[in-house]
Image: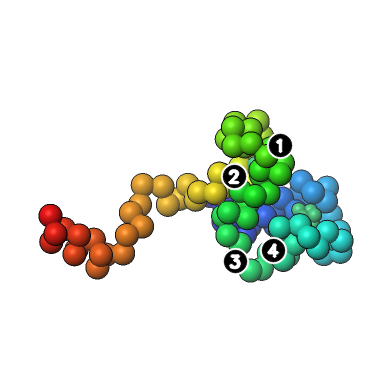
Amino acid sequence: MTTPLKSIRKYCINDCMAGQSREVLKCPSKDCVFYKFRLGTGRPKLKQIRKFCFDCGEGTYNAVKNCKFPDCPLYPYRLGHNPKLEGRCNIPLEKRKSFKKKL
Ligand code: SF4
Ligand code: SF4
């Protein structure tokens, strides 16, 4: 699976600029949430992808959740979650130990 940054780059080139990477470089939409990541640098937050998808999906959770375009590079991240981290606990190890002691 790709990373959020690579997905954004791919989206910019293939879906927004019809495969023209030079056009992505010259993108005039400075207010686009992907603008500073369009060249494949930076650390995008998943909520930025979610925001973009909400704009694409008529601003409703259901429209984004039921997006009909699984080939879109942003699809795995459209709800603001990273599927690679699914099922992993995000509580730091130290806190987990102290939590166990309390039980
Ligand atoms: S930054 Fe936004 S407007 Fe510019 S190429 Fe990417 S998706 Fe399109
Ligand atoms: S994943 Fe779906 S909602 Fe998000 S940008 Fe792509 S087509 Fe739009």
For label 2, being within 8 Å of ligand 2 is answered: yes
Q: Amino acid at mark 4?
A: Phe
Residue under pointer 3? 43
Picture coordinates of residue 9, whole percent (x, y): 70, 57
- 14 lies left or right of 6: right
Which of the two marks, 2 or 1, is nearer to us in this view? 1
Residue under pointer 1? 58
Q: Residues within 10 Å of mark 3 (few under 14, many from 20)?
A: few
Residue under pointer 2? 78
Q: Residues within 10 Å of mark 1 (few under 14, many from 20)?
A: few
**How far apart are the alpha carbons under marks 2 and 3?**
16 Å
Vertical arrangement, residue 54 with respect to residue 48, above or below: above
Q: Earlier in the sequence, mark 2 or mark 1?
A: 1
- 34 lies left or right of 50: right
Q: Visible in this render: residue 43?
A: yes
Badge 4 vs badge 2, beta-carbon distance below 8 Å: no
Residue under pointer 4? 37
For label 4, being within 8 Å of ligand 1 is answered: yes
Picture coordinates of residue 69, whole percent (x, y): 66, 34
Q: Residues within 10 Å of mark 2 (few under 14, many from 20)?
A: many
Quadrant into which the C terminus falls: bottom left
**How far apart are the alpha carbons under marks 1 and 4?**
23 Å
Picture coordinates of residue 74, whole percent (x, y): 63, 47
Q: Visible in this render: residue 24?
A: no
Q: Earlier in the sequence, mark 1 or mark 3?
A: 3
